[in-house]
Image: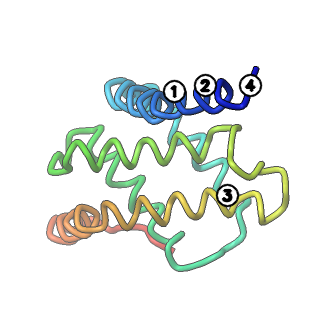
Amino acid sequence: MDKDAATGAVGEQAPEEPEKGYEKAAEVLRDPDKMERLLQKLEQKLRPVPVVGDKLADIPILVSMLKSWVEKEYTDVPRRSLIVLVGTLLYIVSPMDVIPDFIPIVGQLDDVAIVALCLKLIQPDLDKYVAWRRSTGREVAAE
């Protein structure tokens, strides 16, 4: 395979990868059982991660918002934000990371970066959710 063929093959595959992620995220959004399994995997994966910043404290709120949406308690979340959030969770629990998770601390850095990007993209919707939780007298767990 020559250099141009290799570059062309990679270039052709690259646009398909995000699309596959979006499709998988949308599939998880449609299936409450898949969503619950995803949340359980996320909890297991995050438990051993050392505290690396204030943004990790928002993860329980993200999960709470998503669970409230799945349970149809809180549905004022734009589809775009749901797809960003579920795509982020799928990346975190995926064994295929940019930096393998088995490398202590450094292995979680790409996960933290993806969560930080997710938070930046959906922060206004997360803030609305927190306000809704407070207005309904529900506690939001964030440590």
Task: Say the numbered circle drawn on residue 3.
Answer: none
Which amino acid type is shown beneath numbered disc 3?
A: Arg
Q: Determine whether, in the image, residue 82 is placed left or right of residue 46.
A: left
Q: Earlier in the sequence, mark 3 or mark 1?
A: 1
Which amino acid type is shown beneath numbered disc 1?
A: Glu
Q: Earlier in the sequence, mark 3 or mark 4?
A: 4
Which amino acid type is shown beneath numbered disc 4?
A: Asp
Eyeballing the image, is 22 above or below 100? above
Q: Earlier in the sequence, mark 4 or mark 2?
A: 4
Residue in the image at 42% along x and 58% along y = 118
Residue in the image at 50% along x and 46% along y = 89
Which amino acid type is shown beneath numbered disc 2?
A: Ala
- Distance between the alpha carbons at the discs numbered 4 and 1: 15 Å
- Mark 4 crowd level (few <14, some 14–19, many ≥20, 10 Å Cα): few
Q: Nearer the viewer, residue 14 or 62?
A: 14
Where is mark 3, residue-wise?
47
- Mark 2 crowd level (few <14, some 14–19, many ≥20, 10 Å Cα): few
Where is mark 1, residue-wise?
12
Where is mark 4, residue-wise?
2
Which quadrant holds residue 46? Answer: bottom right
Say what secondary structure mark 3 lies in. Answer: loop
> Looking at the image, what colour scheme do you see?
rainbow
Say what secondary structure mark 1 lies in. Answer: helix
- Distance between the alpha carbons at the discs numbered 4 and 2: 11 Å
Tell me if label 1 and label 2 are in contact, CB under 8 Å. yes
Eyeballing the image, is 51 above or below 100? below
Where is mark 2, residue-wise?
9
Q: Position of residue 29 (x, y in %)?
A: 34, 32
Q: Determine whether, in the image, residue 88 is placed left or right of residue 137.
A: right
